[in-house]
Amino acid sequence: MDILKLFTDFSGKKWYEQLAGFIVIVLLFVIVRAAFSEDSLIEGLTNDKSDSTSSRPTPDVMVDPLKKRNDELRHHLRLDTDDDKYQTHYEDIIIHQEEWCNLEILKAISDEKHTSSNSKKHMALVERVNKLQEYKKSLEESMKFVDSQ
């Protein structure tokens, strides 16, 4: 009981009354600050503020660098030529990667150590197969892109 006397201040209030008062003051401060705050969230690629000197680029300014970057990458990959030789090589790469995925999936599901009742190993197998399937979908999308060039 002597310990509780230590938490009694000069006005006679107990420590838990003081703590409750402090929490109320902090909550009021947070609510008032949130209600009157000038900070606002601006969605990407928009500029809701009428300040024309904003350092944020507008979408029309961003298009040219993106187009230039894509043209440089297309040139680096030699997709900008009329020669279909490189396109054929990219298609072959994608075909071989897809074959590799299929073989890895077949190897994973036919592996004897994964046929046991160990659920952790089985879940690891399922995750690996799912990742390989996702990679195959990416390869299919890449093949569509290469074919469109």
Image: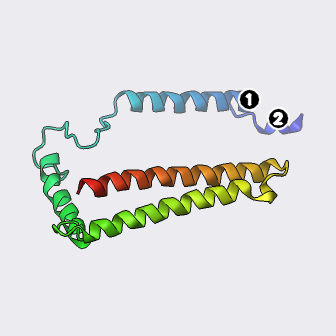
Q: Quadrant of the N terminus?
A: top right
Task: Work out whether mark 1 precedes mark 2 in sequence or the reverse, and give the earlier one.
Answer: 2
Residue ranking furthest to the left = 52
Q: What residue is rendered at 25% in x and 53% in y?
A: 148
In the picture provided, is 15 more to the left or to the right than 47? right
Q: Are marks 1 and 2 in contact (CB under 8 Å)?
A: yes
In the picture provided, is 32 more to the left or to the right than 61? right
Q: Nearer the viewer, residue 98 or 12?
A: 98
Q: Label 1 sits on what residue type?
A: Lys
Q: What residue is rendered at 12% in x and 48% in y?
A: 60
What residue is pinned by disc 2? 4
Q: What residue is rendered at 74% in x and 29% in y?
A: 14
Q: Quick check: 26 above or below 87? A: above
Q: CA distance from mark 1 to mark 2?
A: 8 Å
Q: Nearer the viewer, residue 109 or 36?
A: 109
Neighbourhood count class around disc 2 (C-alpha, 10 Å): few under 14, some 14–19, many 20 upward = few
Q: Label 2 sits on what residue type?
A: Leu
Q: Give the x, y percent position of residue 111.
A: 75, 59
Q: Quadrant of the C terminus?
A: bottom left
Numbered label tally:
2
Q: Give the x, y percent position of residue 47.
A: 19, 40
**Way the structure is coloured:** rainbow
Q: Quadrant of residue 68?
A: bottom left
What residue is pinned by disc 1? 14
Q: Quick check: 85 above or below 30? A: below
